[in-house]
Amino acid sequence: MHVKTFKQGIHPAYNKELTSGKELKLAQNPAQVVIPMRQHMGAPCDPLVQKGDTVKVGQKIGDSQSFVSAPIHASVSGVVKDVREVEIGAGGKSLAVIIESDGQNTLHEDVRPKGDLSSLSAEDIRMIIREAGIVGMGGATFPTQVKLSIPEGKTVDTMILNGAECEPYLTVDHRVMLEQAEEVVYGLKALMKAIGVTKGYIGIEDNKTNAIKVLTEACTGEAGIEVVPLHTKYPQGGEKMLITAITGREVPSGGLPADAGCVVNNVTTAVAVTKAIREGMPLIERPVTITGHGIKNPQNLIVKIGTSVSELIEQAGGFNGTPGKVILGGPMMGPSAHNIDVPVQKGTSGVLVLTVNDAQDFEPQPCIRCARCVDVCPVFLMPITLANQSQHKMYAEMENYNVLDCIECGSCSYICPAKRPLVHYIRLGKAEVLAQRRKKK
Ligand code: SF4
Ligand code: SF4
């Protein structure tokens, strides 16, 4: 099998065998869901319901006038118990609609098929995706309809589906590709039509040979669509890395995938698009890998948005001894959760429970100038220089050293023999550079 890849990157322990053979199962129906109004990049939504209202599955309960946003829908039917601020993710806060389920899962009248793909225009598809509240489900949560609105002056000819799932431990995209291959291909065709391109690729790492086989079969006879096996290497699923590996094109510094003629979406996002068109079902649930050696029975569950992370841990058998750390997502990019009573959101691809041993933090040592962080950076930055600049608040210098190209993949921190928290400092500095840019505007 001929595999493609990008330059640099790392090979962490993948630990995917804990769940890669476990089929997707429906999680138990939650008695209550807590649905945050801020669970995507861009403007948060304003609640459209209030305490005491009755809601049905798929009913829009939050929306925003802002272009960069995505509406939010009820994932259960029942009664709105409260609308208030709650803790989400890694310590952030958001206004949330709290719904007590009536156990009936009654569908809202708006949930109905949107017509055959051949009869829908590009604009129809983009509007269906917008109204369904679909965002990037690989974790980035960028509103999909915004990605599909190609900026004026840019020419795009290629849609790429990301099936790399390069984050260690996570296996939901793998299971989706195996179990919902036809839906993945249908979603890809819809996404291609939405931006008017005739070339589509599905990039899959070669540690998922069964998914490569199943999707290659599902694409047989589909004009312009190709499955591309990729070398298993982190961060192969980064947009820039995928584009380079698959098309040989480079996204310029400070540029967007559209500058290389491409739009990238995740395979699970493609399935959400299929459901929105075929069933009229908005994004109200998502697959989540609950895994790690700190959990008794790791598994892949389809979970209603708003379900508590603590309920998922219980459904996976509970903690295996004293947990060392709980991470929402994968170990490379996922934030640590200090509280497990937080809701699953549209971008929650995994709940990783590390043991005390796995989570051991090492005391950072002085830099030994080995340059290994430079050697692995997939966007060719100088992580040690950026981290030092950040510590010394040299934000103008950081901008000159292209800090905004950093994809926060964590490869530099991972490889550092002195265990320096490089990505932590770079992330802080990057946020400050962005804040100063906004101020200037
Ligand atoms: S500098 Fe940024 S992009 Fe480069 S390895 Fe570190 S986290 Fe990844
Ligand atoms: S990898 Fe660590 S020790 Fe080596 S140059 Fe980078 S920061 Fe310094």
Image: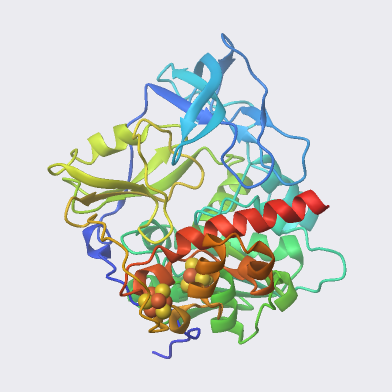
Looking at the image, can residue 10 be seen?
no
Residue at left offset 60%, top offset 71%: 160
Looking at the image, can residue 112 be seen?
yes
Farthest residue to the bottom: give it: 2
Along the line of sight, the residue nearer the viewer: 299 or 249: 249
Along the line of sight, the residue nearer the viewer: 17 or 220: 17
77 is higher (above) or lower (below) than 17 = above
- The part of the image, by quadrant, that contains residue 209 is bottom left
Farthest residue to the left: give it: 321
Picture coordinates of residue 164 (x, y %)? 45, 70
Along the line of sight, the residue nearer the viewer: 431 or 36: 431
Residue at left offset 21%, top offset 57%: 358
Picture coordinates of residue 400 (x, y %)? 69, 73
Q: Left of 267 or right of it: where is 320?
A: left
Q: Left of 43 or right of it: where is 26?
A: left
Picture coordinates of residue 54 (x, y %)? 56, 13
Picture coordinates of residue 33 (x, y %)? 44, 26
Q: Which color scheme does this rendered protein use?
A: rainbow
114 is higher (above) or lower (below) than 269 = above
352 is higher (above) or lower (below) than 156 = above
